Amino acid sequence: MAYRTLQATAAVLTLSFSVASANAASMEAQVAEVIDDVISWRRDFHQHAELSNREFRTAKVIAAHLRALDLEVTTGVAKTGVVGLLRGGKPGPVLALRADMDALPVVEKTGLPYASKQRSEYEGREVGVMHACGHDNHMAILMGAAEILAGMRETLPGTIKFVFQPAEEGPPKGEEGGAKLMIEEGVLNNPEVDAIFGLHISQGSEVGTASYRALGFMASAQRFDIHIQGKQTHGARPWAGVDPIVVGAQIVNGLQTIVSRQIDITQHPAVVTVGSFAAGVRNNIVPETATLSGTIRTFDANVRNSIHEKIRLIAERTASAMGAEAKVEIDPGVPVTFNDPALTEQMVPTLKRVYGERGVFESARVTGAEDFSFFQEQVPGFFFFIGARPPELTQAQAIPNHSPFFYVDEAALAPAVQAMTELALDYLRAAAD
């Protein structure tokens, strides 16, 4: 009897393995059918990069593809966002899959044949425009997944919203945009979304790998601006005025002491970076004003509030001590990217099925930020990274996102399309069961 039971169990396991293998082979074949288009879309987006809230051409390309798949398409969401609704043939939950659309004010230096030569205006300055953060890949991946999933609509147990989001890098100053505005305009409603998935590409790990982290994954981020009011004078007589450039330089030095001397970084990782220092128009004039702009990255709300206060104190008191005035502005920014632990535990096996046990690992915390976090404040979310570092590069040689030299190994795209597709299928089927 025991022998027969063992035989039956072995037969069931063999059948399950055969079905799983057949399903995997079928999915790989479907990905193979769309991957040339995915690469083509990605290169097209890369060559025609557009800044935040200005993704007009990008939105048209995406909307046309979703309409060709016979999805219910809404455009103009949060200015230039596109949402495609795929209703499955069976009842089930509503899942959102998100990709960001915008590029950065960066002059590309990759030398790729499809490198961006786009020019635009950013905060009053003419700039180059480049997909230096990989959003071109994210859009193409989601378009490929949409095509595969649309071909399964009759058997899908639920509904999928394909959310193409503008202005992830932050809308221009004085404008609204991004995930927060999409939420305000109802992207998670009608029908109401139960969960949301998103991904990000980088050279942080080798092509053919994926990484994740439950709970706090990516940092909260805020922009700060410090406006310094001095007194203009001739550069030959600096004592006749108050030099805002010197004041600003002292403030920059003072800000460096916040993380290095005032925060316990063994417990609370944090970053304060000044990324812009603007002042003056001529070599022999001490200007009247100077402006510093930077970013704050934290994982803890109390530390975040403490850093905000320290920035204000250092800027205002340093300026006052030197006869100037400083006004500090800190925007609300974005919260921590927080992966729901139960949803993460549920979906990691899918990643391992696609990338293999050794190809999936738990990440350290990332000081980059993502406004995907706004979606995660409303519904359970799972966000993960895909590796795109060419095998010939070592970890030390990895090119960071936002670099003018950033590029990806396009071999990363096929498994990413498969992962996004299988994550959606596994989530819907598990909820339906």
Image (tube, rainbow, N blue to C red):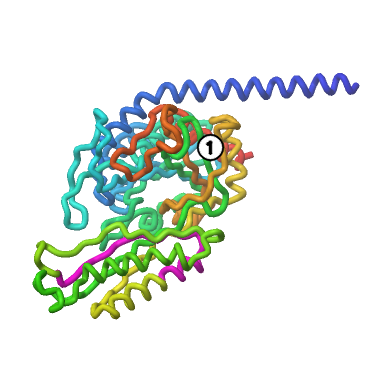
Q: Is residue 298 magenta?
A: yes
Quarter containing the C terminus: top right
- Does residue 83 appear anywhere in the picture? no
Quarter containing the N terminus: top right
Viewer-side residue, 415 vs 280: 280
Q: Where residue 101 sits: x, y (%)? A: 33, 44
State the residue at coordinates (34%, 65%).
253
Mark 1 surroundings within 10 Å by alpha-carbon count, few (fewer than 14), some (14 through 19), many (20 or more) = many
State the residue at coordinates (52%, 61%).
268
**Res 16 quadrant in image:** top right
State the residue at coordinates (45%, 40%).
204
Bounds of the magenta span?
287-308
Q: Where residue 349 sits: x, y (%)? A: 60, 36
State the residue position of label 1.
Answer: 423
State the residue at coordinates (30%, 66%).
225
Q: Where residue 24 sits: x, y (%)? A: 56, 24
Q: Where residue 51 sits: x, y (%)? A: 26, 48
Query: Mark 1: which amino acid?
Result: Leu
The answer to whether 372 is drawn above or below residue 281 in the figure is above
Viewer-side residue, 261 vs 209: 261
Q: Secondary structure at mark 1?
A: helix
Q: Is residue 404 magenta?
A: no
In the image, is 381 to the left or to the right of 35? right
